[in-house]
Image (tube, rainbow, N blue to C red):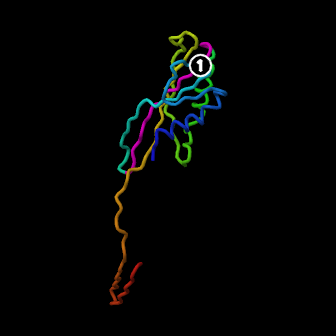
Amino acid sequence: MASVINEIESLAEFIEPLFAGASVHYQQIPVEPKVNSLILRYLSSNNATETNYHYRIDREYQIVYFAQNEFACLQKFEQLERKLNDVLVIPLKNSDRYLRLEFFSFSQPFKTESGTVTAILGILRVSLREPRTQNPYNKIGQVHAEIRSEIGVTVTKTNC
């Protein structure tokens, strides 16, 4: 079953190696952001029916990075963009399921209100297919087959 928390943790596990030594925050941007800070935030979710047996969940996540200057921000997000474009799916933690990557885009770097650090924002859209809950039906208990031929021979079989 889909879980936003598991998806955020899986995304963090996938991208953290690019941001070595960065302090990682989930959902909340610190009031006083520090250089080399990474934030992963859930933004929105939509779903769509694909078949009677499953539906697709489209989610958007925001990735925020704080660095000393504009070039450091751009360098990290270019590396992130390359890593995300090199794969089609990201494995989900504690599952045999995957998040399918749809697109990644990012803003130009900008100075924060304090003016002490520079930030860059990225949006990552992912999708996940989920099976619908199916109603259970009683299994066929027994099958009786009676086969008659034209010459009058009858064969009866049970639980064929």
Residue 136 place in picture, x, y as percent: 36, 61
* Horizontal side, residue 132 vs residue 118: left or right: left
- Relative to 11, residue 55 above or below: below
Q: Secondary structure at mark 1?
A: loop
Looking at numbered disc 1 in the image, what kind of residue is underneath it? Answer: Lys
**Residue 44 among those drawn in magenta:** no
Give the x, y percent position of residue 130: 43, 46
Residue that appears at 56% across and 44% down: 93
- x and y, in percent, of residue 51 in the image: 37, 47
User: What residue is at 60 percent from the left and 35 percent from the top?
Assistant: 14
Q: Quadrant of the C terminus?
A: bottom left
22 or 58: nearer the eye?
22
Q: Residue at x 54, y 37 (%)?
A: 9
Taking 30 as reference, is 44 left or right?
Answer: left
Which secondary structure class fits the magenta region best? Answer: strand
Q: Determine the residue located farthest toward the front in the rendered image.
A: 31
Query: 126 or 8: which is nearer to us?
Result: 8
User: Label 1: which residue?
Assistant: 34
Magenta extent = 53-70
Rendered position, 130 above or below 104: below
